[in-house]
Amino acid sequence: MKKVVAAIIKEKDQILIAQRHSKDPLAGKWEFPGGKLEPGETPEECLVREIREELRVEVEVGSFYDGNVYGFKDQAIHLLFYWAGIMNGEVTSVVHDDVKWITIKELAKFDFAPADIPIVKRLEREYI
Protein backbone atom coordinates (compact mmCIF):
# COMPACT_ATOMS: atom_id res chain seq x y z
CA MET A 1 0.00 0.00 0.00
CA LYS A 2 1.35 3.41 -0.97
CA LYS A 3 1.86 5.98 1.76
CA VAL A 4 0.90 9.55 0.95
CA VAL A 5 1.29 12.55 3.22
CA ALA A 6 -0.58 15.84 3.13
CA ALA A 7 -0.11 19.14 4.94
CA ILE A 8 -2.77 21.18 6.63
CA ILE A 9 -0.83 24.41 6.29
CA LYS A 10 -2.12 26.96 8.78
CA GLU A 11 -1.49 30.69 8.85
CA LYS A 12 -3.42 32.75 11.38
CA ASP A 13 -7.06 31.60 11.02
CA GLN A 14 -6.68 30.17 7.50
CA ILE A 15 -5.53 26.94 5.90
CA LEU A 16 -4.16 26.37 2.42
CA ILE A 17 -5.97 24.18 -0.10
CA ALA A 18 -4.93 23.34 -3.66
CA GLN A 19 -6.93 22.48 -6.77
CA ARG A 20 -5.76 19.45 -8.74
CA HIS A 21 -4.45 20.18 -12.24
CA SER A 22 -6.87 19.81 -15.14
CA LYS A 23 -4.80 16.94 -16.61
CA ASP A 24 -4.47 14.98 -13.33
CA PRO A 25 -6.75 12.24 -12.06
CA LEU A 26 -9.54 13.91 -10.07
CA ALA A 27 -8.99 17.10 -12.06
CA GLY A 28 -10.51 20.18 -10.49
CA LYS A 29 -10.97 18.61 -7.06
CA TRP A 30 -9.50 20.39 -4.05
CA GLU A 31 -6.99 18.79 -1.69
CA PHE A 32 -4.47 19.40 1.02
CA PRO A 33 -1.06 19.57 -0.71
CA GLY A 34 1.42 16.74 -0.33
CA GLY A 35 2.61 13.63 -2.11
CA LYS A 36 3.98 10.10 -2.07
CA LEU A 37 6.75 8.94 0.24
CA GLU A 38 9.99 7.92 -1.44
CA PRO A 39 11.97 4.92 -0.14
CA GLY A 40 13.79 5.71 3.11
CA GLU A 41 11.93 8.99 3.62
CA THR A 42 9.99 9.87 6.77
CA PRO A 43 6.53 11.43 6.40
CA GLU A 44 7.91 14.73 7.69
CA GLU A 45 10.81 14.71 5.18
CA CYS A 46 8.37 13.90 2.40
CA LEU A 47 6.13 16.83 3.28
CA VAL A 48 9.03 19.28 3.35
CA ARG A 49 10.18 18.03 -0.07
CA GLU A 50 6.74 17.88 -1.68
CA ILE A 51 5.66 21.31 -0.46
CA ARG A 52 8.95 22.82 -1.65
CA GLU A 53 8.45 21.20 -5.09
CA GLU A 54 4.73 21.98 -5.43
CA LEU A 55 4.40 25.37 -3.74
CA ARG A 56 7.95 26.81 -3.60
CA VAL A 57 7.86 27.41 0.15
CA GLU A 58 9.68 25.92 3.13
CA VAL A 59 7.45 24.45 5.81
CA GLU A 60 7.93 23.29 9.34
CA VAL A 61 5.96 20.10 9.88
CA GLY A 62 4.03 20.01 13.12
CA SER A 63 2.05 17.27 14.77
CA PHE A 64 0.28 14.36 13.13
CA TYR A 65 -3.44 15.15 12.78
CA ASP A 66 -5.15 12.10 11.28
CA GLY A 67 -4.90 9.35 8.72
CA ASN A 68 -7.10 7.13 6.64
CA VAL A 69 -6.95 4.40 4.04
CA TYR A 70 -8.60 5.15 0.73
CA GLY A 71 -9.19 2.60 -2.01
CA PHE A 72 -8.87 3.64 -5.63
CA LYS A 73 -9.80 1.37 -8.56
CA ASP A 74 -6.48 -0.45 -8.69
CA GLN A 75 -4.87 0.23 -5.30
CA ALA A 76 -5.25 1.62 -1.82
CA ILE A 77 -3.32 4.48 -0.27
CA HIS A 78 -2.56 5.19 3.37
CA LEU A 79 -2.97 8.95 3.69
CA LEU A 80 -1.38 10.78 6.64
CA PHE A 81 -2.21 14.39 7.49
CA TYR A 82 0.11 16.70 9.44
CA TRP A 83 -0.21 20.28 10.60
CA ALA A 84 2.41 22.57 9.03
CA GLY A 85 3.41 26.20 8.90
CA ILE A 86 5.25 28.22 6.27
CA MET A 87 8.71 29.24 7.40
CA ASN A 88 10.00 30.92 4.25
CA GLY A 89 8.78 31.94 0.79
CA GLU A 90 5.61 32.97 -1.01
CA VAL A 91 3.16 30.29 -2.12
CA THR A 92 3.53 29.72 -5.86
CA SER A 93 1.48 27.00 -7.51
CA VAL A 94 3.70 24.76 -9.63
CA VAL A 95 1.53 21.66 -10.18
CA HIS A 96 -1.95 22.80 -9.14
CA ASP A 97 -4.44 24.88 -11.12
CA ASP A 98 -5.12 27.09 -8.10
CA VAL A 99 -4.33 27.51 -4.41
CA LYS A 100 -6.44 29.35 -1.84
CA TRP A 101 -6.21 30.44 1.76
CA ILE A 102 -9.58 29.77 3.39
CA THR A 103 -11.08 29.49 6.85
CA ILE A 104 -12.24 26.11 8.11
CA LYS A 105 -15.83 27.42 7.89
CA GLU A 106 -15.33 27.79 4.12
CA LEU A 107 -14.27 24.16 3.54
CA ALA A 108 -17.84 23.11 2.67
CA LYS A 109 -17.83 25.44 -0.35
CA PHE A 110 -15.15 23.38 -2.13
CA ASP A 111 -15.35 20.04 -3.96
CA PHE A 112 -12.64 17.95 -2.26
CA ALA A 113 -10.98 14.78 -3.50
CA PRO A 114 -12.66 11.75 -1.87
CA ALA A 115 -9.59 10.79 0.18
CA ASP A 116 -9.53 14.25 1.80
CA ILE A 117 -13.23 14.39 2.73
CA PRO A 118 -12.92 12.55 6.08
CA ILE A 119 -10.31 15.11 7.17
CA VAL A 120 -12.47 18.01 5.98
CA LYS A 121 -15.37 16.62 8.04
CA ARG A 122 -13.17 16.20 11.13
CA LEU A 123 -11.82 19.76 10.82
CA GLU A 124 -15.38 21.07 10.54
CA ARG A 125 -16.52 19.08 13.60
CA GLU A 126 -13.60 20.18 15.74
CA TYR A 127 -13.07 23.79 14.71
CA ILE A 128 -16.46 25.24 13.77
Image (cartoon, rainbow, N blue to C red):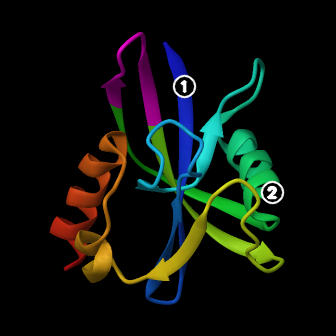
Residue nearer the viewer, 17 or 59: 17
Residue, far front? 23
Residue where numbered disc 1 is placed: 3
How many other residues sit within 10 Å of disc 1, few (<14), some (14-19) or many (≥20)? some
Q: What label does residue 31 carry, if any?
A: none
Picture quadrant where residue 126 is located: bottom left
Picture quadrant where residue 40 is located: top right
Q: Residue at x 45, y 55 (%)?
A: 28
**Dominant SS type (magenta):** strand
Residue nearer the viewer, 101 or 58: 101
* Kind of residue indicated by mark 2: Arg
| Rendered location of residue 49, percent (x, y) | 79, 47
* Kind of residue indicated by mark 1: Lys
Asked if residue 1 is among those painted magenta in the image, a careful observer would answer no
Q: Residue at x 44, y 23 (%)?
A: 77
| Rendered location of residue 22, percent (x, y) | 56, 50
| Horizontal arrangement in the rendering, residue 92 relative to residue 20 (left or right) | right
> Gap in Å between the C-alphas at discs 1 and 2?
19 Å
Mark 2: which secondary structure? helix
Mark 1: which secondary structure? strand
Magenta-tinted stretch: 69-79
Residue nearer the viewer, 66 or 36: 36
| Horizontal arrangement in the rendering, residue 64 relative to residue 68 (left or right) | right
Q: What label does residue 52 carry, if any?
A: 2
| Horizontal arrangement in the rendering, residue 128 relative to residue 84 (left or right) | left
**Residue 121 higher or lower than 68, as above or below:** below
How many other residues sit within 10 Å of disc 2, few (<14), some (14-19) or many (≥20)? some
Residue nearer the viewer, 43 or 51: 51
Residue, far bottom? 12
Badge 1 vs badge 2, beta-carbon distance below 8 Å: no
